[in-house]
Amino acid sequence: MNGDPALYKVLNELKITFDYYEHPAVRTIDDARKCWIDIEATHCKNLFFRNHKGDKHYLVILEHSKDLSIHDLEQRLKQGKLSFASDQRLEKYLGLTPGSVSPFGLINDHSKHVHVFLDENLKQSKKISFHPCTNTASLVISYADFQRFLDCTGNIFEYLKLYD
């Protein structure tokens, strides 16, 4: 299976079952949509940001088809000026590469540095999908299991209304 072996170990320890879908590497939502045709789940956009000082980092998760401007996001998160974090920061804090951003990368955030913001509409999902720390596969898990995964990471997370 493609993905981080440490992630599969954590999922196994938590007794989280998943459906595994292997696909060609995808770097954008448009590319991923082609691979998700037969996958019944809420597919997400996972955005990794830093604050203007570069001392705080945020993972923002929302439904993949929703658009959100950075200026609007700044207003909603109330964390000051935001910009996309560099590839180096993505590797440092989540152990991920561009195109593979996923909350599953939180297993690599040993200092619990990354703050997670989730759109509250995601709570309505029965199943949700994310890359297993590589963009050549997708895992589908129940939303309840995703919540358990977030709880086990130890990272701070909160739900916000990110769009109307």
Image: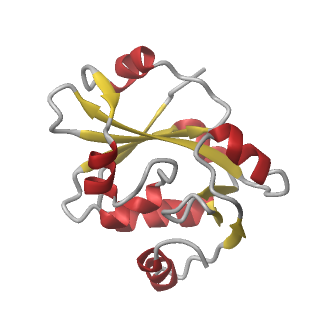
Image: 2 above or below 48: below
- Quadrant of the drawing holding the C terminus: top right
Q: Quadrant of the N terminus?
A: bottom right
Seen at 70% across and 72% down, the residue is 19
Residue placed farthest to the right in the image?
38
Q: Residue at x 40, y 57 (%)?
A: 96
Pinpoint residue 60: horizontal percent, then vertical percent: 44, 39
Between residue 72 and residue 122, name the one nearer to us.
72
Measured as percent of width and height from the top left, residue 64 is found at 64, 38
Question: Which x, y percent locates residue 86?
Answer: 31, 39
Kindly identify the residue that appears in the image at 32 percent across and 27 percent down: 83
Question: Can you give x and y, in whole percent of width and height, for residue 120 in the image?
Answer: 53, 37
Give me the residue at 53% from left, 22% from top: 68
- The answer to whether 14 is drawn above or below residue 39 in the figure is below
Colour option used: secondary structure
Name the one closer to the observer, 39 or 32: 32
Is 18 situated left or right of 8 in this image? right
User: In the visual, does 104 lie left or right of 67?
Assistant: left
